[in-house]
Amino acid sequence: MQKWVADGLLVGLATIVLGSTASALFPRNSIASIASSSLGAVSSSMVLARRRTRLLPKSEEPEENAYPQLPELSEKHVSDVLEESDSAEHTPFSEPVLDKNSKASLIENPSTNPSTEDTSEEAENLQLLDGRLSEEVAIKWLANRGVSVMDQPELDPHTEEIFNKHAVRLGNKYKDEDGQPQLSRLLGQIKWSITNERNLTCHLSRASQKQIGTITQFGKDLDKDTLFFSRYKYFPGEKIIRASVRNRPDTRSFFTGGWFERFIEYKVSDFLQRSNLSYSRLMNRLIQFSNGDSFELDLFYVVEGKPLLIECKTGRDRDAYQKFSDRRKRLSISPERAFLVILDFDPDETEQLSAVWKFNIVGQDNLIPQIEAALGSN
């Protein structure tokens, strides 16, 4: 320790002595003074280095093999590695081919593909609605019978996504678990507001707290998407919703019945996909016969090569029975594969009216079992 201190003093002393000497000999030459001081510091450092070599214990010296040695790479090895890398970069990507069984497993067991798993119910609904199969098979089926499908304006995907999302939610929450009115309370007031061109007022004093929570949250979500309300506010003290419906044709059409068609389309397509049945679908498409007659199809499916005709109604229009009967016959679709779906239809009336009209008249709750029975019998 004493030797290290002495060496440190030696460095400083040598620097001062040489610097002072140069200043005395060359009083006006600052460069000479700086050079002499630097020389003194360098000389002293060399002395310290030699002394450190003598004093350093053997254990402190770095070993020759203290660091891992990298293997020597031959020219051939490097060439092989580069060839493998180049081959990997240019390997063409091929999409997985799914057969029917694999398609069904992906739908029924989303956990098998954790990278794309989404636990959001709305996201799952939208994925289904956006994953419809091609319309070509359904169009060809009609064309073979002399029926043309008219072109329709291109729809905005973002707007369609919003409408589909709220249609599925409205259908699923239309009633609560006990079958009591839920979102139907708000929907009824919206339809009244549109028909009478008045502001919307929805009283919720008779609704349960759970129902109020569901209804007001739905109202907030509608307002957030900006397509539906120009003004929306819930007054918790009075338990009243006050809002104004936007004056948009697509928004008004959605509330007055379009939502129900979208919801039924979701339910049917969901059933067909989960049943692993191939299908093609037309929705709200205008068709024309060779003689110029035309009408709009709510929903038309070709399932495993056979037709399925579905009409959706949110009201009790007695003329709808006759119209649907005429259309079914015009398209030569068998009675068991034709369905008139009526919102809130009494199940007790199903069998009797279906027998009278020679096609299936059902409500939204018993539609899928009826379709399943019809597909299984053919």
Image (cartoon, rainbow, N blue to C red):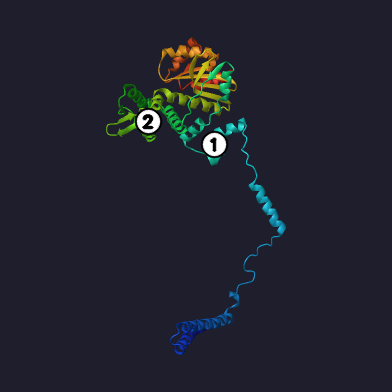
Residue 175 location in percent, x, y? Answer: 40, 26
Above or below residue 243? Residue 300 is above
State the residue at coordinates (49%, 27%).
Answer: 266
Hey, which quadrant is residue 376 in on the image? top right
Residue 268 location in percent, x, y? Answer: 51, 25
Q: Residues within 10 Å of mark 2 (few under 14, many from 20)?
A: many
What is the residue that sits farthest to the top in this orientation? 356
Residue in front for this viewpoint, 274 or 166: 166
Residue that label 2 marks? 228
Residue in front for this viewpoint, 92 or 59: 92
Q: Residues within 10 Å of mark 1 (few under 14, many from 20)?
A: some
Residue 258 location in percent, x, y? Answer: 43, 24
Residue in front for this viewpoint, 11 or 25: 25
Above or below residue 97? Residue 290 is above
Q: Amino acid at mark 1?
A: Pro
Residue that label 1 marks? 110
